Every structure is written in structure tokens, then in C-alpha cells.
Amino acid sequence: MASSLSIAGIHAAYGAVRVIDDVSVKVGGGETVVLLGTNGNGKSTLMKCIMGLVRPSQGSIVAEIDGIHHDLVGRTTEEIVDLGIALVPEGRRLFPKLTVEENLLLGAFRRTARRELNRNLEVCFETFPRLAERRHQLAGSMSGGEQQMLALGRALMLAPKILLVDEPSVGLAPILVSRTIDAISEMKQRYALTVLMAEQNFTQAIRIADRGYVIVHGKIAFEGRSTDELNNNDLIKKFYLGL
């Protein structure tokens, strides 16, 4: 049963600085939805709200997993992860002095994932063969693209139902961005994931997205119900396509 995510009327701030203002986003079961926005517009903050790292001042975040609705606001990050929601954070946040395999094993925090640890590790190496080749290499000695694969693999170790990916293109060469986006698409298809991806590389993001939102100054400025609607939107043309 595909999982879904419903975010309604979320407000969030850091102290007196309001970052998210009445944001509503829906990700249907089995969808890949992209949240488009340039730096500083609230994409990462919204991801942190979903994961319980930032507590919204208003609004609701509800995940439907295996037919059960879970209100995420007020839950700890550990509880949210244990439901089957995984985040690939901006900047990857690996443990550079640990090996590839050690980083992956640390990803198996969820109780269900711990019970299937060896199987999940095999799945991860099958999905990302390069990680299998370098399983004993220190994470910090890998290239940026390889580190991004490791960050995705670590999320896969959770055996997630919902995958959040925050700015996967940051710091990568164009060809590596393309490979990373393809890897997210492969993970989604192969393991029937529901994906919310925050990204500012419009051209790459819409290659795999079913639809998306544009966030500007902490507010949803446009909802595209298809990639065609995103392509033909004036905001997209102005901020991303230079038209």
C-alpha cells in the first residue's frame, strides 16, 4: 500500500524570524513531488518540520502509512523515522572518518530495518554497486557524487516508505547531478517509494517529478499539477529558465 504525505497550513520560524508562512503541500501515494525554490526560501525548513527537527507554530503534517494516518507534529525525529520516513539531508551529512559500510549500518536505525539489516545491506549494494566496491573505504575520501550515492544508500537502509531528499544537486558537477536524479528515480520505482524532493535545479528535477510546487519567501507561489504546467509557468520562466 503506497504511503502519502499531507502538509496543511504550516507556519515555522527561527526565533522571531518567520521562515514558513501558511504552506500546504500534498504528496500522493507513489508520487514524486518536487519543491522548487532558490536558496533561503524555506525548502530545508519544511523538510525539517516534517522530520520533527523544527516544530511548526501552526498547521498539520499527516503521513498515511500502511493505511494508518499519523500526525507528525509533536513527534520526535526518532518516532518519525520509525514510521518509515527517511531524509537525505542537504550536504549529505556523512561520517567522513567511518567507512562506507559503517555509514550504511548507522542508517539502519528503524526497528524494522534492524531486523532486516543484512538483507537491506544487500539491497543497497545491489542498487549502488559502487558502494559495494568501496565498502571499506572512508566516506570522506570519496568523490562528491559517490558521497551522494552513500547518503541515498543510507536512507535506503531504513527500508523507508516515504523518502525526503533535500537539495541532492548541491556541490555536484552537472553530469553527477543527472546521475543522482536518476538514482532517486530508480529507488522510487524499484521500492515503490513516495518521494518529496526539494531542489533548485529545475531542469533536472522535472525529469523525474510527477508535479511540483514553487516556494518563494516561505510561501507556496505556484502549484503545478503536471510538469507541463511547471514548464509553462511565468515564475519558472523568470527564476529558472531566464526567459
Image (tube, rainbow, N blue to C red):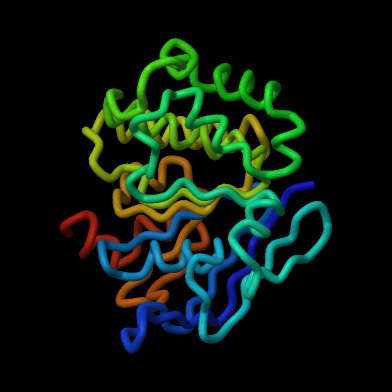
Residue under the image location 42 percent in, 30 percent down: 149
Q: Position of residue 1 (x, y in %)?
A: 80, 47
Residue under the image location 50 percent in, 27 percent down: 102
Tell me: 98 left or right of 67.
left
Q: Nearer the viewer, residue 202 or 217?
A: 217
Give residue 79's quadrant in the image. bottom right
Residue under the image location 27 percent in, 68 percent down: 40
Q: Position of residue 131 (x, y in %)?
A: 45, 19
Residue furthest to the bottom in view is: 16
Q: Position of residue 10 (x, y in %)?
A: 52, 79
37 in relation to 32, above or below = below
30 in relation to 187, above or below = below
Quadrant of the rendering where the C terminus is positioned: bottom left
Give residue 43's quadrant in the image. bottom left
Residue furthest to the right in view is: 67
Residue under the image location 63 percent in, 74 percent down: 73
Callout count: 0
